[in-house]
Amino acid sequence: MRIVIAAVGRLRGDAEAALAADYIQRAAAHGRALGFKAVELIEVEARPPGDMRREAGVLLGATPETSRKILLDERGAEWASRQMAEKLARWRDDGLAATTFWIGGADGVAQTLKDQADEKLAFWQADVAA
């Protein structure tokens, strides 16, 4: 299964790009041993910036056809790391070709994209040991 991260916007500067490349390289190396074929970052830009409908279109265009679509949304479900790993493993074992994580622009995402998401996920810090 491929893991695709489709994000509106571009990384800023060499340091951010190097950090992202390092994490993607690590995820890909460890992922292959777990049956994940690739980890990809696709940065998309909508013109004009802030046009959520156009951003939704470019995110959809960057999404593999047979992909499970996960929207990163502040009002989404809160998965612990283990729960996320279990979901990815189940989808991989079910023969899913790809999982795509959508990251919208600064203004959020259009309702049409929310409606097409299979899951909505909020990142949070809850599984940090207390």
Image (cartoon, grey):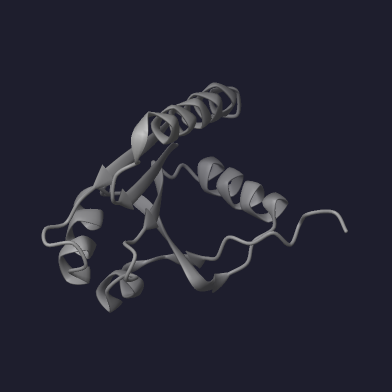
Quarter of the picture holding the N terminus: top left
Q: Is residue 83 left or right of residue 29?
A: right
Closest to the observer, 23 or 35:
23
> Relative to 113, does residue 60 appear above or below in the rendering?
above
- Residue situated furthest right in the rendering: 130
Q: x, y (%) of residue 64?
A: 28, 45
Q: x, y (%) of residue 23?
A: 52, 31
> Relative to 102, does residue 88 appear above or below in the rendering?
above
Closest to the observer, 15 or 121:
15
> Relative to 49, does residue 15 appear above or below in the rendering?
above
> Relative to 111, does residue 4 appear above or below in the rendering?
above
Q: Is residue 129 left or right of residue 110?
A: right
Q: In which image quadrant can residue 4 be found? A: top left
Q: Residue at x 58, y 70 (%)?
A: 77
Q: Residue at x 29, y 44 (%)?
A: 10
Q: In which image quadrant can residue 127 be found? A: bottom right
Quarter of the picture holding the C terminus: bottom right
Closest to the observer, 98 or 20:
20
Q: x, y (%) of residue 3?
A: 43, 40
Q: Is residue 38 left or right of residue 53?
A: right
Q: Is residue 13 left or right of residue 54?
A: right
Q: How many marks?
A: 0
Q: x, y (%) of residue 6?
A: 33, 48
